[in-house]
Image (tube, helix red, strand yellow):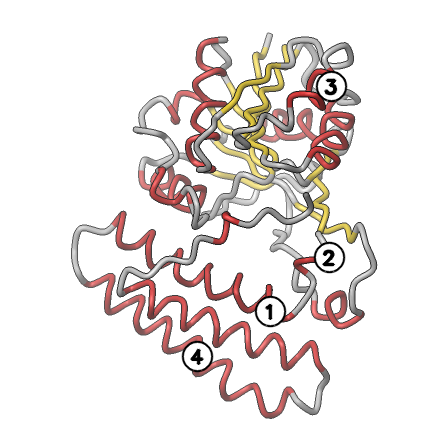
Amino acid sequence: MLKVAICIATCRRPRWLGQLLESLAKLEYEKCPGVIQTVVVVDNDYTGSARAVVERFSAHLPGLIYDLEPVQNISLARNKTIAIAKKLDCEYIAFVDDDEFVDQKWLDELLFTLEVFGADIVRGPVIPVFADPVPDWIVRGGFFERQRYAQTGQRIRWGATNNVLIKREFLDKLDGPFDQRFGLTGGEDTHLFERLHRMGAIMVWSNEAIVRENIASSRANLRWLLLHSYSFGSMLASCDRALETQKKWLITRFIKGVGRIFQGSISFLPSLFLGYASAAKSLTYIARGAGMLTGICGYKLEEYKRVHGK
């Protein structure tokens, strides 16, 4: 028997949380039968706005657990889900975001891939779904398309909490394990998975473990894309600052930041003749590079203070 906790941190997204819980109630296990599944929802809204949604699904998801983390900080909320999973003695922990929903075979495929390839961590694809009409250039530019890898079982380096399965024993070795310094800026998962990599955890890809992400219309615009790119660059510098003990990271990140700005700058003028999507992509490179440079100086953009898709 495999005991798995599906951990969800949520904040003021009751409609999409309901969609996610509905999809989790339909999970099927064929390749890995005998799974004992627990769904842990931690509400990061101090008003407890997710409680009613969770209670509505309690009859369809046996073992569904709700808890509250009143301090707005995504790291604290994620850590509370893990603490609950540990008390239940779950061997594996899966993460999915509250603006997503999963395919029926999602967790079955993650578990199967982990077993077949002897991995410690398995990630899967996240496919964007536009819940509302968005400008055509957003779709053409692929701004919300996430990286996919060639084949199942491929070794990969970078992780995220939007579709992942982790052996709990690795999380037991880390403080937190999510660092609350990233609780409002984002990047808490980038920081965690880099530490897991340095510990020797083996991470592989599963093409069949599919999650779909709702894209709020408030994100489908140039302003958000630039702010997000800037925030991502700043977050990468913050992760370097938190992880590296030698100052050479400053030089490396500075070079990467300048390189991104240069890349965006030289492609911007030609991109004006290729359409709005190409021009916007060039600007996101510049924004990411600028974020890296200001992140080196310790500046942080608290992107998680605003909730999209409420």
Amino acid type, callout 4: Ile
The amino acid type of the residue labelled 3 equals Tyr
Q: Horizontal and vertical percent for residue 200?
A: 35, 36
Which element is circle 1 on? helix
Q: Disc 2 marks which residue?
A: 217
Please tell me which residue lies in front, 92 or 59.
59
Answer with mark 3 or mark 4, whichever residue precedes in sequence.
3
Q: Amino acid at mark 1?
A: Arg
Q: Are marks 2 and 1 in contact (CB under 8 Å)?
A: no
Numbered mark located on residue 261 in the image:
4
The alpha-carbon separation of the residues under discs 2 and 3 comes to 34 Å
Residue visible at 65% across and 21% down in the picture: 51
Element on which disc 3 rests: loop
Mark 2, Cα crowd under 10 Å, few <14 / some 14-19 / many 20+, is: some
The percent position of residue 145, horizontal first and vertical second, equals 67, 58
Q: Which residue is mark 1?
A: 223
